[in-house]
Amino acid sequence: MSQEVLSLKNVTIYQDKNPVLTDVNIEVKNGEFIYLIGRTGSGKSSFLKTLYADLALTEGTGSVVDYDLATLKESDIPYLRRKLGVVFQDFKLLPDRSVKDNLLFVLKATGWSEQEEMDVKIEEVLDKVGMKGFASKMPHQLSGGEQQRVSIARAFVNRPLILLADEPTGNLDPATGEGITSLLDEINQTGTTVVMATHDHRVVNAMRRRVIQLDRGVIVRDQERGVYE
């Protein structure tokens, strides 16, 4: 693994054959924390979907955790995603499974098989996100903030090289949202690169990390220790 975990050069990102972002040139080093900002419809989600291969890269060159996105085979996508964690605005927890079973689903899908090892892993990650003791709870028994913490635990359970968060505080009140952002910062400090799409001015301005701003289909700003302007 090189120090560079993400590179996009001369990329155009398409959604339904329509260009969403053009002339995308970005390099991200291992361990960075990046805010991806821009108005609704500016292409933030499409950018993230390209990184985890939900949208194919058809123009330009790109690599994520040493996988070539332009030549990526469909059979390789699960292996790419094992090195990534994804957190969504609407949590996307399996509603008919407990917290523990939501995490077990991910571990089994990515090759884990020893029950004792999985139990230890789940206990560790739930403790990390402040949800120790909630393993038997069902998603509907949790608050929005608690569900998002479980969602982060699910994304982090395999210790991904990159964690992608798509508006993770969008459905939460300000205080809860700040807690989620602090949790992502703690995960970043363990060495995981974090790319967080957000329109939350407060968290961006408070943490002063690298900011990549999208507007009208292009990157208009890439700034270290940036603010939400």
Image: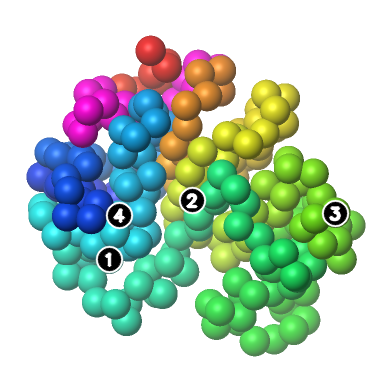
Task: Give me the C-alpha separation between circle 3 and circle 1.
Answer: 39 Å
For the N terminus, give its image quadrant: bottom left
The answer to whether residue 205 is magenta is: yes
| Residue 52 appears in the figure | yes
Q: What element carries label 2?
A: strand
For residue 178, above or below residue 115: above
Q: Residue at x 56, y 18 (%)?
A: 202
Q: Mark 3 points at which residue?
A: 141
Q: Mark 2 points at which residue?
A: 163
Q: Residue at x 26, y 26 (%)?
A: 215
Image location of residue 191, percent across then percent down: 51, 48
Q: Which amino acid does label 4 sit on?
A: Thr
Which of marks 4 and 1 precedes in the sequence?
A: 4
Q: Name the residue under label 1.
A: 67
Q: Is residue 43 left or right of residue 152?
A: left
Q: What residue type is labelled 3?
A: Gln
The one nearer the camera, 55 or 41, is 41
The answer to whether residue 72 is magenta is: no
